[in-house]
Amino acid sequence: AYVQGKFEIFTRDSLVRRCNAILYAWYYEMMSRAKDLRHQVLFNGTSACIRKAALEKIGGFSEVTLTEDIDTSFLILSAGYETRMLDAVVTTALVPWRFRDLTTQFWRWSNHLSSRIFSF
């Protein structure tokens, strides 16, 4: 249903940003590679090519969520589609400047993710 490319953090001018770059590298090099073995890579919100038919089948992107990328992943995978990882950096990204912003982002991802998993 989609191919997820990698992105690289190009701003590593602080400890928080360097740590975030390491976390993203771990996510792509460990987690996404493992998920790719089962053709169940999660959509990360950027750097992906998605089939229009797959989006139409699940009703498009949700407009009532904070993490439409994760919702899209779960709905597409639940519809029986396979997803893959493109082992190439296709874009660059910015990450939060402050530790507080980084922890807020992680909370948002983990809180939404856990509520979504247990709602199936």
Image (cartoon, rainbow, N blue to C red):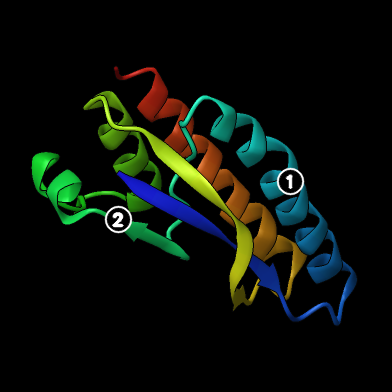
Question: Mark 2 belongs to which amino acid?
Answer: Ile
Q: Residue at x 21, y 53 (%)?
A: 61
Q: Position of residue 52 (x, y in %)?
A: 16, 56
The residue singled out by tag 2 in the image is 50
**Which sits in the foreground, 116 or 41?**
41
Q: Residue at x 26, y 24 (%)?
A: 80
Q: Quadrant of the N terminus?
A: top left
Q: Residue at x 82, y 56 (%)?
A: 22
The residue singled out by tag 1 in the image is 29
Residue 10 appears in the figure: yes
Q: Position of residue 37 (x, y in %)?
A: 58, 28
**1 shown above or below 81:** below
Q: Residue at x 69, y 45 (%)?
A: 27
Question: Mark 1 belongs to which amino acid?
Answer: Glu
Quarter holding residue 83: top left
**66 shown above or below 99:** above
**Of label 1 and label 2, which has the lower sequence position?**
1
**73 shown above or below 100:** above
